[in-house]
Amino acid sequence: MEELRVFLEALIYSGYLKREVPTQLPLLTFEVKPQPDEDWQEIIAGTKRVFQEAWAKAGGE
C-alpha cells in the first residue's frame, strides 16, 4: 500500500490529475489479475479497499 500511496502522491504533485484530458475526468487504470486459486471478487474488493486507503493517505480529493 505504501508504494501505491507514493505513486498517487507523485501523480498529485506532478499535476497529472489536473491536466486537460478529452474525458470528463482524468483516467487512471490498474491491471489486477487473480491467481487461479483466488476468488476474483475478493481480489477486486481488496484492490478497491487498498486503493481508497492509499488515496486518502496521499491527500486525494
Image: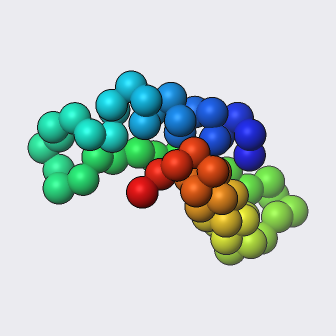
Q: What residue is rendered at 63% in x and 51% in y? A: 57
Q: What residue is rendered at 53% in x and 39% in y? A: 8
Decide if residue 6 is on the left or right side of residue 11.
right
Nearer to us in this view, 37 or 28: 28
Q: Is residue 7 above or below residue 40?
A: above
Q: Is residue 42 above or below residue 13?
A: below
Nearer to us in this view, 18 or 22: 18
Residue 18 location (% of width, % of height): 26, 40
Total marks placed: 0
Residue 54 location (% of width, % of height): 64, 51
Quadrant for the C terminus, please: bottom left
Residue 40 location (% of width, % of height): 70, 68
Nearer to us in this view, 61 or 39: 61
Q: Is residue 4 visible?
A: yes
**Color theme of the render:** rainbow
Decide if residue 18 is on the left or right side of residue 38.
left
Residue 22, quarter of picture: top left
Q: Is residue 60 above or below residue 40?
A: above
Residue 15 location (% of width, % of height): 33, 31
Decide if residue 19 is on the left or right side of residue 29.
left
Nearer to us in this view, 16 or 58: 58
Residue 21, quarter of picture: top left
Q: What residue is rendered at 72% in x and 65% in y? A: 46
Residue at the outermost top position: 14
Q: Is residue 47 visible?
A: no
